[in-house]
Image: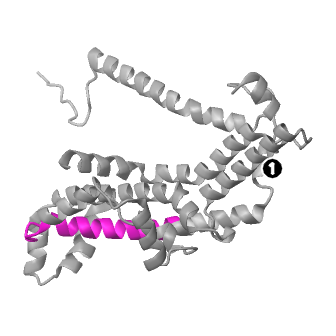
Amino acid sequence: MSTIKRHPSRRVWTADAIAVNVTSVIVIGLFALICLIPFYLVVIASFTPESSLIRDGYPIVPRAFSLESYALCLKNPTSVLMAYANTIGVTLFGTLMAILLSTMTGYVLSRPEFPWRNKFSFFFFFTTLFNGGLVPWYIICIRYLDMKNSYLGLVLPLMFSVWNMIIAKSFMTGIPAAIAESAKIDGANDFIIFVRLFLPLSKPLIATLGLFSALAYWNDWYNCMIFITDENMFNLQYFLQRMLGSAQAMRLVAEKSGIDLPSVPLEGMKMAMTIIATGPIVLLYPFVQRYFVKGLTIGAVKG
């Protein structure tokens, strides 16, 4: 009597399993749709005339099409490109340095042979609860670090994050200690162990820290407002914020004085600026998504 052999990799789907999977797909699809609808409305509103937005609100199906908002945002393309270049340069360099500092600090604090690791960890954590205040920080940055009208003022304040360091420390603690011990027996020092062993094993961590740091640098406008007065050094977020502020001031003057000034599509400009400012960084996420979830989960569980 012959027996039927089941392929070990073939999965038998029961009715309950199919129901659970279908329900999961539907629920996740609905949540994804809920997350995409606001971004869809922003895109549609950026191509909608101002009069239509004021009269009908944000439409699901556009009734009219206009490029006026983008034309005003890109009226001075040289300044926009300069702001883009400043933001991209600061983001790339700052993200690289932030990853390097966080991973190096996390490596040192994760090593059991480092006797002061707990004391240093408490010191870093303490800075997240208390600080010296805005005025002493500003005086130190301007008077002693010479960060006024310097790219250092855009890079240095965000270069080190205690939260990123904690994630790096938690992740590297999960790497087996036998790897470092065997390398030390072969004569490798800590720098070689960190560069050749721990970093290649920390791709999910690097992707997670890179995304966090890149988002922080890309969305930063506060440090630019404090330290930068040279218009050629403005980053994208602060440049667009100043442009929108100028448009709002022009409309307010026109309303108060009764002067007939050209209509400025403020609502449309807000949506167009959102697309211009967030488009490139949104496109970055799909490339690091598979590492991002793993790195964040490991850091959260072990932290």
Q: Nearer the viewer, residue 108 or 189?
A: 108
Q: Nearer the viewer, residue 217 or 96?
A: 217
Left or right: residue 130 compared with residue 220? left
Q: Residue at x 63, y 68 (%)?
A: 229
Q: Quadrant of the N terminus?
A: top left
Which quadrant of the view contains residue 52?
A: top right
In reply to whether residue 94 is colored magenta, the answer given is: yes
Q: Residue at x 63, y 65 (%)?
A: 234
Q: Residue furthest bottom?
A: 187
Q: Where is residue 207? Give x, y as percent.
A: 38, 57
Q: Which residue is mark 1?
A: 71
Q: Residue furthest right?
A: 260
Q: Where is residue 85? Give x, y as percent.
A: 63, 67
Q: Main secondary structure of the magenta part?
A: helix
Q: Nearer the viewer, residue 18 or 85?
A: 85
Left or right: residue 65 compared with residue 23? right
Left or right: residue 220 compared with residue 157? right
Which quadrant of the view contains residue 105?
A: bottom left
Query: Looking at the picture, does residue 54 appear above or below residue 238?
Result: above
Mark 1 packing: few (<14 Cα in 10 Å), some, or many (20+)?
few
Query: Looking at the picture, does residue 119 appear above or below residue 45?
Result: below
- Regarding residue 3, the answer to whether it shows in the image is yes
Task: Specify the segment rendered in magenta.
Answer: 91-117
Q: Of helix, strand and loop, which one carries label 1?
A: helix
Q: How many marks?
A: 1
Q: Residue at x 79, y 34 (%)?
A: 50
In reply to whether residue 122 is colored magenta, the answer given is: no
Q: Where is residue 81? Give x, y as percent.
A: 70, 64
Q: How is the image coloured?
A: one colour
Residue type at mark 1 is Ala
Q: Residue furthest top?
A: 15
Q: Nearer the viewer, residue 170 or 79?
A: 79
